[in-house]
Image (tube, coloured by chain):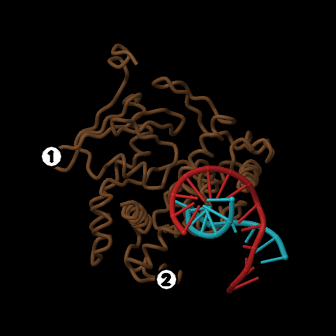
Chain colours: A brown, B red, C cyan
Amino acid sequence: MTAGSDMTERKIRIEQVRDFHPDHIFDCGQCFRWSREGDGSYTGIAGGKIANISFLPEKDGSGRLTLYNVTEEEYHSFWRTYLDLDRDYGKIKKRLMQNDEVMRQAVAYGHGIRLLQQEPWEALLCFILSQNNNIPRIRKCIESLCQNFGVYRGMYRGKAYYDYPSPETLASLSVEDLDPCRMGYRAKYLIGSAKKVVSDGIEALQAMAEEQASAEEAFDYIRGFPGVGPKVANCILLFGMGKYESFPVDVWIRKVMEQLYGLKHPKEISAFVQKQFHPYGGFAQQYLFYYIRGVEQL
DNA sequence: GGCCAGGGGATTA
DNA sequence: TAATCCCATGGC
């Protein structure tokens, strides 16, 4: 990149941003398409738009957020909501940390976590692929899917970016077409789910992200998609439909619940989550997930 | 309700 | 080289 193009690159700055850290947000398991750069910023694609996001902490605990390749109009119409910047995380943390030393540790560790407001279609695809899978390979599957069958969105800093294929495109493919994406047995679920989106209409899926659709209603609907069991459904609810009381339980969360809280059975866990975290179970899940994975790697 | 195949890749034994 | 583990689901 030349100095000239750098100086003319559009960007927007937001000062005094609290409870924000790119590593915590983009590496807490909620999304798979953001890549860390050498300077600690992240580059990715969302809502059909490409951006680079960097954050510079200030002494007072807040910081300066800079979005590159983003106009002010795009910030207000998309990124502000996508990054969940209008939510008061201080309030949520306070509630979650009440009488809970484990959560105090987890929140201290992942203090900059925010839940991205992703599209239902994106969440449906990503979390079907996430089943019985690890994060690096989920990322590879998704990148390959987008590069082979997705929508070209342009070049940025020398790299081509592709969005997800449309439901119609994915529904028209065969399992063999998806072989290069190396999804294994998940490929048939992905195609089957795309076919259901096409036949039901994308509006039916998107309606579940509206506030008037209850978490129970949305859960029942997406459970009707092939490859969507209870765990995947809860992830889609939380990450793609704004149902923040959802608490996806995977092997890592089971580990937290057993080792840190002494809870083993699913019924004990859900009762505890309801009592201790409601209505912020989803936020609690992210703090705990990021915490246990970080601690395990040490 | 419990068991097990489904794919593939990274890590561990 | 073999076994194990992954942000599970579906079918029996």
Q: Residue furthest left?
A: A59
Image quadrant holding the C terminus of chain A, namely bottom left
Q: Nearer the viewer, residue A171 or A258?
A: A258
Q: Amino acid at mark 2?
A: Lys
Crowd rating for badge 1 (residues with CA inside 10 Å; few <14, some 14–19, many 20+) = few
Whole-percent x and y of residue A124? 62, 53
**Does residue A193 appear anywhere in the picture?**
no
- The reply, left or right, for residue A22 in relation to residue A190 is left
- The span from disc 2 to disc 1 (Cα, nearest Å) is 41 Å
Q: Is residue A248 above or below residue A184?
A: below
Checking the image for residue A14, the label placed there is none
> Mark 1 — on which chain does it sit?
A
Residue picked out by circle 2: A264
- The reply, left or right, for residue A212 in relation to residue A25 is right
Image quadrant holding the N terminus of chain A, namely top left
Which of the two labelled residues, at mark 2 and mark 1, occupies the earlier sequence position?
1
Whole-percent x and y of residue A51? 44, 33
**Does residue A94 appear anywhere in the picture?**
yes
Whole-percent x and y of residue A19? 28, 53
- Residue at image position (32%, 65%) is A106
Checking the image for residue A59, the label placed there is 1
Secondary structure at numbered mark 1: loop
Q: Nearer the viewer, mark 2 or mark 1?
A: 2
Q: Is residue A51 above or below residue A211?
A: above
> Mark 2 — on which chain does it sit?
A
